[in-house]
Amino acid sequence: MAGFFAQLKEGLAKTRQSFVEKVEQIFTGRGKIDEDMYEELEEVLIRSDVGVKTSMELVQRLRQEVKSRKIVDAGELKSVLQELIVELMGEEKPLEFAGQGTTVILVVGVNGVGKTTTIGKLANYLRVEGKRVFLAAGDTFRAAAIDQLEIWGQRVGVEVIKQREGADPAAVAFDALQAAKSRNIDVVIIDTAGRLHNKVNLMEELKKVRRVIEREIPGAPHEVLLVLDATTGQNALQQAKLFQEVAGVTGIVLTKLDGTAKGGVVLGIQGETKIPVKWIGIGEGIHDLRPFIPKDFAAALFDRPGEGEISD
């Protein structure tokens, strides 16, 4: 994990430049804590894709901490802000698995965010952990989506259940769950279509898929993971709100965190939707999708040692 932390720190370099370094300039550029400082901080947070609501809440919490701790030196506020960010993101939220039988993970998100790639990498992670995994090609709207999922299935060594392009996604889910139950498969990951041009159609399609899943495996789906592209900043936040409304999202996978200056959107997503970020992608490699650990994210963002890291 120490190697992954170093990779995370490197991946967050642009976010650190656009966010933390500007925050540091605010805190170290003045001796006293005043109203101008709070206003500047709020502006930097908003510009860093944290979002207006969450930025205002963080600044208000900082005011309260300054007052309760009787802090007078602005130089002390960087560590306080880091504490508040960790508090905002909460504890690590691992994947939920079925108590017994097959676990079902439904994956949603718009096209182009790395949804199919995420499914492949997640399948690989679970397979390495010793779980038997099936993939279900439920995005039947695009032949390319089925083909891409098949390529990932071959790459990571897991079977893909599919039908033809244009088939009923609920029928694909049914086939996958029937096969999984008969062969004692541990986890089924179901892909879904990513189109958003008609919210009603999307909602009805997802409802139908969920009805089939719930009928075949009571209590499923155990997770509904929304894949978001960190490079889209506030658009990712808007997508989170929409899918929260139509899909009952239980967790978020944030891809492409490496190389973007918009990593602050993690805070906005958690602050405004309360949906936990469960997984993050910080590279194109097959092993570059990992569980999200808020303390390590904050430590990497603020360029400090993470858990399992030893400072020089």
Image: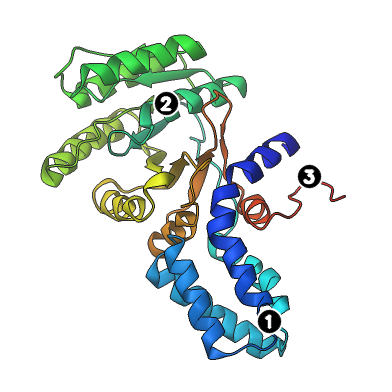
Q: Is residue 107 left or right of residue 172?
A: right
Is there CB contact under 8 Å for labels 3 and 2? Answer: no
Circle 1 is placed at which residue position? 74
Q: Tell which circle, 1 or 2, labels the residue nearer the N-terminal end.
A: 1
Could you tell me the amino acid type at mark 2? Thr
- Element type at mark 3: loop
Camera-side mark, 1 or 2: 1
Locate residue 102, reporting x and y percent. 44, 26
Res. 308 mark: 3
> Crowding at label 2, few (<14), some or many (≥20) Cα neighbours within 10 Å?
some
The amino acid type, in three-letter code, at marker 3 is: Gly
In this rendering, position of residue 60 left or right of residue 9: left
Visible residue check, residue 84: no
Residue 117 tag number? 2
Q: CA distance from mark 3 to mark 2?
A: 28 Å
Instruction: Reply above or below: 244 against 207.
Output: below
- Counting other residues with Cα less than 10 Å from the Cα at mark 3, is it few (<14), some (14-19), or many (20 or more)? few
What x and y, as percent, mark residue 226?
A: 37, 42
Identify the residue at horizontal 50%, vertical 78% (top origin). 40
Amino acid type, callout 1: Ala
Residue 71 at x, y = what percent? 71, 87
